[in-house]
Amino acid sequence: MNVKPVIFDPQTAGDADWQALNVFDNVFRAETWPDDPSKPLEETIQDRRSVPSFVNVVQWVVWSDNHDEIWASANIGTLETEHNRHLAEYWIGVVPTMRRRGIARQLLKDIARVAGERNRRLMIASTGSVVPAGKTFMERLGAKPGLESHVNQLNIADLDRDLMRDWQERAKERAVGYELGMWIGPYPEAELEAIKTMMEVMNTAPKDDLDVEDFTWTVEQVRQMEESLAGRKVERWTVYARHVESGELAGYTDVYWNPNHPEMLGQGDTGVVPQHRNKGLGRWLKAAMIEKVLQDRSQVAHVRTGNANSNVPMLRINHEMGFKPYRSWTVWQVELEKIDAYLANDG
């Protein structure tokens, strides 16, 4: 098909544009997450308008002939940071009824052009097993799997609450000299320097074959992440462990709750700084957090988290809690020159 992708600008989009994009989002939501409710219009708007400024995103859409629905969309995002300046992350989606008509290829041309303009040599994208067209497209580009992962889900009804209490009791014996604390919502300004350092413990999580550098953050970037959460109306809870004698933050776990989907909780990071490991802090953090959820978020029925298949220590903890595989995901990487070669071949 001879289609013309156009840029979707969140700052200038009109009501009809947003309505169409929300319908498009929910088509993909129904295909990828069929158990979940639709996304309300305001969430679509908030998500697009609340991107941290150090994340440089361009989005395109392909309109139907009558300009009354969106057939496809794509985006490319790059971090304007000191690290990973060789990377670009991208996504392409075409509604099922319009696939295999060359639309994705047209969108890929714009993605490749922007990646070249930004001097990004490596392209990263993710696909899920429930949409096999994504895997087929990535293989056609010559992309290689960089990391295999799962979204794992815990049904609260299946949680062994006695086990969670036992984890906390055992931690009091193993983790003498540590204490837990909690931040509801934004991080305290006075702790941002220590918090951004603590966040970097996630660099110890498996990267497998991904050509990705460690992520390092500035205090200003952490502030921008905070503003993004506020703009999206997402509430974050963080339980942290502190080494009492030194005052060091030793580890943390965080969860995310969206009032538009009150039955679902997103488990984000869980990490313990290497020199404070093997004291039961990971289980203590997770058990204390789920206890807080049970007390104050009784509407939560499911908790979801993403884990690399190779992250054996965290998978062990999650499986003991009752998390089970829910969706499999693959993170692909492909050199920009391979994409350019693919686009140059009209066959």
Image: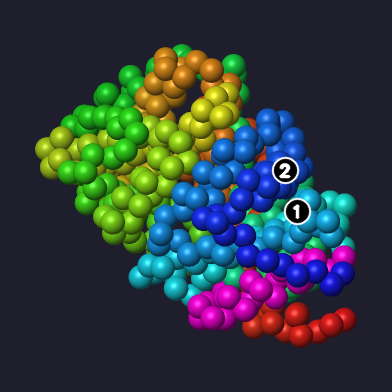
341 to 203, vertically: above or below: below
Residue 99, image x, y percentages: 85, 59
Taking the magenta stretch, the answer to whether it contains residue 143 is no
Q: Is residue 267 left or right of residue 225?
A: right
**Which residues are drawn in magenta?**
101-122
Taking the magenta stretch, the answer to whether it contains residue 105 is yes
Q: Nearer the viewer, residue 313 or 211?
A: 211
Residue on which disc 1 sits: 70
Q: Residues within 10 Å of mark 2 (few under 14, many from 20)?
A: some
On the question of residue 179 being in view, the answer is: yes
Residue 192, image x, y percentages: 24, 47
172 to 124, vertically: above or below: above
Residue on which disc 2 sits: 23
Residue 170, image x, y percentages: 33, 23
Q: Residues within 10 Å of mark 1 (few under 14, many from 20)?
A: many
Q: CA distance from mark 1 to mark 2?
A: 8 Å
Q: Looking at the image, is mark 1 or mark 2 earlier in the sequence?
A: 2
Label 1, secondary structure: give it: strand
Query: Residue 108 sits in which quadrant?
Result: bottom right
Proximity of marks 1 and 2: CB atoms separated by less than 8 Å:
yes
Amino acid of disc 1: Ile
What residue do we see at 31% from left, 41% from top? 251
On the question of residue 164 being in view, the answer is: no
